[in-house]
Amino acid sequence: MDTNALAVFKLLVVGILVNSWMTRGLSATENINVESIPRRPSVALCNETQLLWEMEVCGEEFKRKMDHVDPQNWCNLTHFISEYHLFSLCTETNAGRINCYWPNPLVESYIIRIHKHFFSNCTLERVILVDPPDDTLTILILIPVFLTLAMIALVVWCSKRSDILA
Ligand SMILES: *[C@@H]1O[C@H](CO)[C@@H](O)[C@H](O)[C@H]1NC(C)=O
Ligand SMILES: *[C@@H]1O[C@H](CO)[C@@H](O)[C@H](O)[C@H]1NC(C)=O
Ligand SMILES: *[C@@H]1O[C@H](CO)[C@@H](O)[C@H](O)[C@H]1NC(C)=O
């Protein structure tokens, strides 16, 4: 992978990490509100066989969508950024559903495998020519971050409200 694609990948990973930290912050907030319920040991419950299977489901869906994209455009982010975002969202949702932390090393190695499959031939020249999708990309990364922020605000607001009502 060349530097440009790598930069984009790093940006995505940063977005993913920020989002997961905030989600963890949110669950911490929830734990304060519901003190009587002990924290679920999510790590211990994560079934890696099942997690890998869930990742395959997301990956297959992404591959199916990429089939509709001309391989000539596989290095052009504008053509598949929304599919990529859905794939990333799918891995997050499915990992969460089966009580696995997200991101985790297993998910990351799966995502890197997908990257190798589709983007290994992307050369620097081809990526440089790509229409800069930075705005779209930034927006797509920021949406989950802002949604998380909004949820935190809602939880805080609700707990304050119940304090007043109580
Ligand atoms: C993990 O999931 C797989 C497939 O759903 C299942 O066969 C296996 O028994 C599970 N393992 C544990 C430890 O729950
Ligand atoms: C990369 O190039 C090789 C050799 O031309 C080709 O066999 C392979 O299918 C290509 N892979 C992708 C993802 O385009
Ligand atoms: C990438 O896709 C966009 C939208 O179709 C197009 O405008 C742009 O010219 C493409 N860039 C390359 C390098 O193919």
Image (cartoon, grey):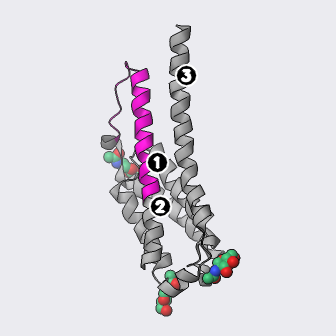
Label of residue 62 in the image: none
Note whether residue 99 is visible.
Answer: no
Q: Earlier in the sequence, mark 2 or mark 3?
A: 2
19 part of magenta stretch: yes
Quadrant the N terminus occupies: bottom left
Q: Position of residue 129 (x, y in %)?
A: 58, 83
Which residue is disc 3 drawn over? 158
Q: Label 3: how many residues lie within 10 Å, few (<14), some (14-19) or many (20+)?
A: few
Identify the image quadrant of residue 27: top left
Badge 1 residue CB within 8 Å of ligand 1: no
Which residue is disc 2 drawn over? 12
Q: Label 2: how many residues lie within 10 Å, few (<14), some (14-19) or many (20+)?
A: some
Farthest residue, direction top: 166
Label of residue 19 in the image: 1
The residues bearing labels 2 and 3 have C-alpha atoms spaced at a distance of: 31 Å
Q: Earlier in the sequence, mark 1 or mark 3?
A: 1
